[in-house]
Amino acid sequence: MAQIVPLHRNDPSKTPLVGNIKVTRQDWLNVAKDILISDGIEQVKILPMSDRLGVSRSSFYWYFKTRQDLLDALLDHWQQTNTAALVAKANAPAKTITEAVNQVFHCVVNPEIFSIPFDFAVRDWARRSDKVRAVLHASEDTRIAAIQSMFQRHDYAQIEALTRARTLYYMQNGYNDADLQEPLEQRMKMVPHYLYGFTGRHAAPHEIEDFRAYCQAVQTGDTP
Amino acid sequence: MAQIVPLHRNDPSKTPLVGNIKVTRQDWLNVAKDILISDGIEQVKILPMSDRLGVSRSSFYWYFKTRQDLLDALLDHWQQTNTAALVAKANAPAKTITEAVNQVFHCVVNPEIFSIPFDFAVRDWARRSDKVRAVLHASEDTRIAAIQSMFQRHDYAQIEALTRARTLYYMQNGYNDADLQEPLEQRMKMVPHYLYGFTGRHAAPHEIEDFRAYCQAVQTGDTP
DNA sequence: ATAGTATTGGACATAAATGTCTAGTGTTGA
DNA sequence: TCAACACTAGACATTTATGTCCAATACTAT
C-alpha cells in the first residue's frame, strides 16, 4: 500500500499562486454566479469551482463556513446589484413617460448594470428554496412598485399604472427569455409596440366595442 | 465478515406488492413529474422515487434503461399535453376575439388540461439542457404562431397580431408565476386590462403624441 | 532574516447517487 | 401443476459530493 505522502504544490500541472495572484472570496463568488447562471444552483459545487480556480477544494472552507454560506452571500449580491439598479432607474427623473420607460428598458437590457441571466437563475433557484423565494418576491414587489409609481408620476391612474408596470416588467422576462440573442437595437424597436401598441393605432375596428361589451359582462357576472 | 444473504421481502416495513397493486411505468413517470415540478429536474433521483413508490430502487431499471431514458419520456409527455392543449384552444372557432382570448386564457388557467407548474418546470429544465431547450423553443414557436394566427383570423394585421400573441403568452407566464395562488375569477378580471387596457380608455392624455414622437425618433435613428 | 499570520494541499471519513448482476418471488396460461 | 415470464430485492462496484484536520507553504511586518 502506498504511504500517505503530502506533496504540496509539487504538481507542476497546477498553477502556483505566487506574485499577488491570489484567489479571493470574490473570486469564489464570481465562479459561483457563473455556474448558477449557466447550470442552476444545484450545480454550484465546491470541487468543480476549485478546479476552475486552480486551487484545492478545501481552500474553499477558509473563505466560507459551508456551501450554504456561499449561497447566502450570492443571493445577497444579487439583491444589491439587479434590484437596486432597476429601482434606481425607475426612480430617476424623466421628462416624458417615454423617456422613463426607455430608461428602465435600457437598464434591463444593459449587461453592465443588470444581468438578465442572473435574474432568471435566481428565479429558478427560488422555486427550490423557501428562503430564496421570500427574497425574490420581496424584490419583485419593490421593483413593480417602483415602476408603478413611475407611471403614476406621469399622470396614469393607479390601476392603469399597475397594469403597465406589470406588463413592462413581465414582458421583459418573457421576451428576453426567448430572444436573448437578438441585438439591442432590434429589441429597442419593440418597445413602442409593447408600450403603445394598443393605443388604437393598430387596433382592429371592432375592438373598443368588444371591450365595452366584455366589461359589462364581467360587471354583471356572466363572463363569456 | 458478514456473508451476502439476500433477504427478499422479509422486511415487513415495506408494503408488499400483491393483489393487482403494482407499480407501472406510468407510476414512475407521475412521480418524476411531481418531483420535477416541485424541486426541479436535478432532484428527479431514482432512490427517492422508489422510496415514494414503496419499491426497490433497482426495480426502476426494469421500466427504464437509464435515468436519461425516464427524462426523455417525461419531456415527451409534456409536449403531448400542455402544448397540444394550448394550440387546440387557439385554433378553436370563436365568434369574437374576446371569446377567442378567453378560450386561451381559460385553457391555461385550467389545471385539468394545462399544467402551469409543469410548464415552468420544463422551462427551468431547458436552461440546463440543450436538447430540452430545443424542444421548448419549438413548442413556444408553435404556441405563439397559433395565437398569432388566431388574432389574424380576427382582422388584426400581422405585426399587431404577433405583438398581441407575445403579450398574451408571456404575460400569463410572468403574471401566473407571481400570483399563482390568486383565485381564477380575480385573474379573469385582469384579462381585459391586458388585452384592452391600452386602447386609450385609461391612456394618459399625452400618450398618443408621445408615441408619434418616439416612432419618428426611431425612424430617424436618434433614439432617446 | 525571521516570526507570525494568512492561505492552501492532501488525507481521511462519510454520505448519496448511478448502474449491473443475480437470485428469488408472484402470476399466468398451457 | 408447473414452466415461462414479469417483476423485485439486495449485494456490489464506482463515482462524486461535503466537511474536518493538520502539516506545509507563502506573505507581511518588524
Image (spheres, coloured by chain):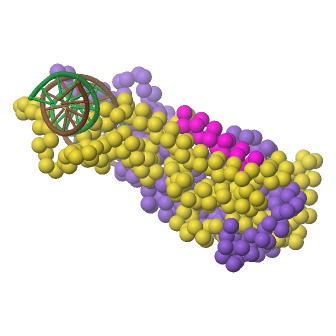
Chain colours: A purple, B yellow, C brown, D green
**Which residue occupies the foreground of this view, A178 or A2?**
A178
User: Image quarter for residue A157?
Assistant: bottom right
- Look at the image and say whether residue A161 sits in the magenta stretch: no
Where's the N terminus of chain A, which quadrant? Answer: top left
User: Image quarter for residue A178?
Assistant: top right
- Look at the image and say whether residue B148 sits in the magenta stretch: yes
**Which residue occupies the foreground of this view, B1 or B5?**
B5
Give the magenta-colored segment's residue range: B131-149
In the rendered image, is residue B37 in sight?
yes
**Which residue occupies the foreground of this view, A178 or B150?**
B150
Q: Position of residue B209 (x, y in %)?
A: 92, 64
Look at 55% across and 41% down and name the residue there.
B79
Q: Is residue D13 above or below residue A89?
A: above
Main SS category, magenta section = helix
Asked whether, in this view, residue B123 is left or right of residue A150, the answer is left
Q: Position of residue A149 (x, y in %)?
A: 71, 71
Look at 36% across and 45% down and name the residue there.
B27
Count how many numbered circles sit on residues in the image.
0
User: Image quarter for residue D10?
Assistant: top left
Look at 49% across and 41% down and name the residue there.
B77
**Which residue occupies the foreground of this view, A60 or B128?**
B128
